[in-house]
Amino acid sequence: MADIQQGYRIKDIEQSQRPRERLEKQGAHVLSDAELLAILLRVGMQGTSAVQMGQRLLYLYEGLEGLLKATFTELCQVDGVGPAKAAQIKAAIELGGRIAKKQPEDRVLITCPQDVADQVQYKMASLEQEELWVLLLDTRNHHIRTEQLYRGSLNSSSVRPAEIYKSGIRHNAASLIIVHNHPSGDPSPSPEDIQLTRMLIDAGKMLELPIVDHVVVGSRGVASIKSLYPELWTS
């Protein structure tokens, strides 16, 4: 354990190179296992940094697999850990396990505009302002997540394609469905809706992240722009 004892203190590291700052700027994937544990632990103990404690835990339990098998009581008995830090570690491990177990088949399959409506109509139909949401889909058209991006008057000049596609790229989506509401209750697409759809379809072609449909929601029903104006997708 000599290398563990020769670790460093977080405050001795240049701020931009500290684990939390690196995660913020570069993403969690660039951090070592010990650095990720250090973020969970938050602080170390006298003479030992949080990173050193992460290294010690990995050493004691022979890596992440051993840490996964460790009980809450066992973690509490490690110097400097205690119930609060042990709970944080076990909670993070459990969340990771649940994400890994969640299969695409557990997600809602989107096959038609009504499937989209089932996901959003209850919330969107009662909104007092226009809002634009984006449904992210995987390669088999399963719903990954919904992003709520814009509120207020929507048109091609107020909506930035970069904002629409950023969430899709970040979550590794295969395609997107645009959804917005009409507070008037009438879901009929407006000329502005058509223009916005055309702009987003063109942007999706360039980014190879296609728009599957643009669905308009109102209290009196839903309208699929793709069903009403299929030529937008073939032009």
Image (cartoon, helix red, strand yellow):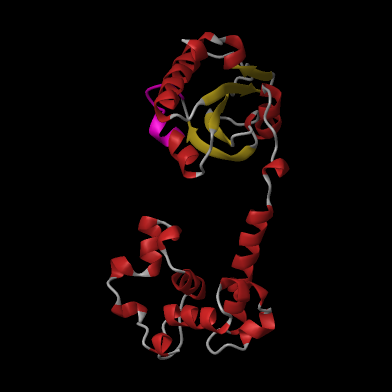
**Position of residue 171 measured from the top left corner of the image (x, y, whole percent):** 51, 44
Query: Hey, which residue is sitting farthest left in the picture?
Result: 14
Is 102 displayed left or right of 42 in the figure? right
Q: Main secondary structure of the magenta part?
A: loop
Q: Nearer the viewer, residue 26 or 150?
A: 26
Q: Nearer the viewer, residue 181 or 118?
A: 118
| Position of 178 relative to 89 (above/below) | above
**Position of residue 230 measured from the top left corner of the image (x, y, whole percent):** 56, 11
Give the residue drawn at x 68%, y 23%. 112
Query: Is residue 204 part of the magenta span, yes or no?
Result: no
The quarter of the displayed image where residue 220 is located:
top right
The image shows a total of numbered marks equal to 0
Query: Is residue 158 part of the magenta span, yes or no?
Result: yes
Q: Quadrant of the N terminus?
A: bottom left
Give the residue drawn at x 66%, y 22%. 113
Is 208 displayed left or right of 15 in the figure? right
**Position of residue 161 measured from the top left corner of the image (x, y, whole percent):** 41, 30
- State whether residue 38 appears in this view: yes
| Position of 49 relative to 225 (above/below) | below
The magenta segment: 154-164
**Position of residue 75 measured from the top left corner of the image (x, y, whole percent):** 62, 82
Q: Nearer the viewer, residue 159 or 16?
A: 16
Give the residue drawn at x 37%, y 84%. 7
The quarter of the displayed image where residue 61 is located:
bottom right
Give the residue drawn at x 51%, y 15%. 233
- State whether residue 129 appears in this view: no
| Position of 40 relative to 44 (above/below) | above
